[in-house]
Amino acid sequence: MLKSLLLAALAAVSFTAHAAESLLARINNHGTIVVATDGAYPPFNYHDASGKLTGYDIEVTRAIAEKLGITVDFQETLWDGMLAGLKSGRFDAVANQVTLGTPERRAAFAGAIPYSWTGAMVLTRKDDDRVHDIADLKGLKAGQTLNSNHAQRAEAAGAVLVPVESLPQALTLVQQGRADLTLHDSLSMLDYLKRTPDSGLKVAWEAPRAEWEPSGLVVAKENEAALAPIDAALKELQADGTLKRLSEQFFGADVSVRDVR
């Protein structure tokens, strides 16, 4: 019992000391930074067959750390507590395909240069040539999770919604002919097509790059100064082809930039 209390006390002291030092200081001192991630969100972050934590977010973060000469301590945590932990100082950064799309998030957090861009995409069966544009969804059956942004967009385009609980279920309905299409996040779709080349599905339409949203490493607003070296590292990784290589490794396409596929 006493040993447990001592370990807890030491952990609390360690956390306090860690939180007292700024993220920029830890980077400049080539220290260790704590990065939160889900650990169960392929292809962004997951455990491979050997149990190793990997994924696009993970490998990009490791590449950034290598450029900066720092060590990364990945802490797997549920999404619900991830940003709260970042705000409280429990984590130095979050690598979990985070977008800062709301005023509330932009007020509390700051983002590094994006390392991925994503938008809407429509998949249909390979033998179905009816969809070439978002307007072509009118009157067609779309397998969608209700109340999602993608479902709202499909419905606004005139599609008849077929309710599903998940993307895999939607894809199955399209394969079976019980739905004509599904509209979803492009990165998830690309990952699916890469993993299942015999799915019988194809990309029928995707949102123009101008509509795509960025994602990347996020820090608390008070650590915004640390983004300068992180951004410098990301620019090097973009220039030397590392981001393109990792993007193609996990998605089969270059999603690290907005204007080139």
Image (tube, rainbow, N blue to C red):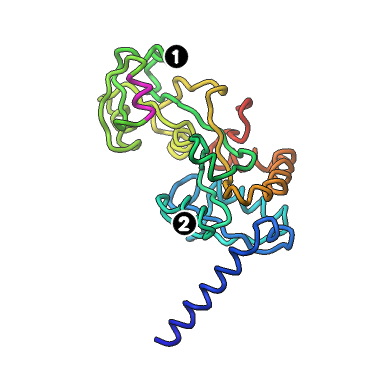
Q: Quadrant of the N terminus?
A: bottom left
Q: Residue furthest bottom?
A: 2
Q: Which residues are magenta?
A: 149-155
The tag on residue 193 is none
What is the total number of numbered labels drawn onto the structure image?
Answer: 2
* Residue at x-position 63% and y-position 42%: 112
Q: Is residue 115 above or below residue 91?
A: above
Density class for disc 1 (Cα within 10 Å; few <14, some 14-19, many ≥20) is: few
Q: Which residue is mark 1?
A: 133
In the image, which is nearer the foreground, mark 2 or mark 1? Answer: 1
With 22 as the anchor, is 196 left or right in this view?
left
Residue 174 among magenta residues: no
- 165 or 50, which is in the foreground? 165
* Residue at x-position 44% and y-position 20%: 204
What's the amino acid at mark 1?
Answer: Asp
Q: Earlier in the sequence, mark 2 or mark 1?
A: 2
Q: Quadrant of the C terminus?
A: top right
Residue 152 among magenta residues: yes
What's the amino acid at mark 2?
Answer: Ala
Q: Which residue is mark 2?
A: 49
Residue 63 x, y percent position in the rendering: 66, 51
Residue 252 x, y percent position in the rendering: 55, 36
Q: Are marks 2 and 1 in contact (CB under 8 Å)?
A: no
Residue 74 x, y percent position in the rendering: 54, 59
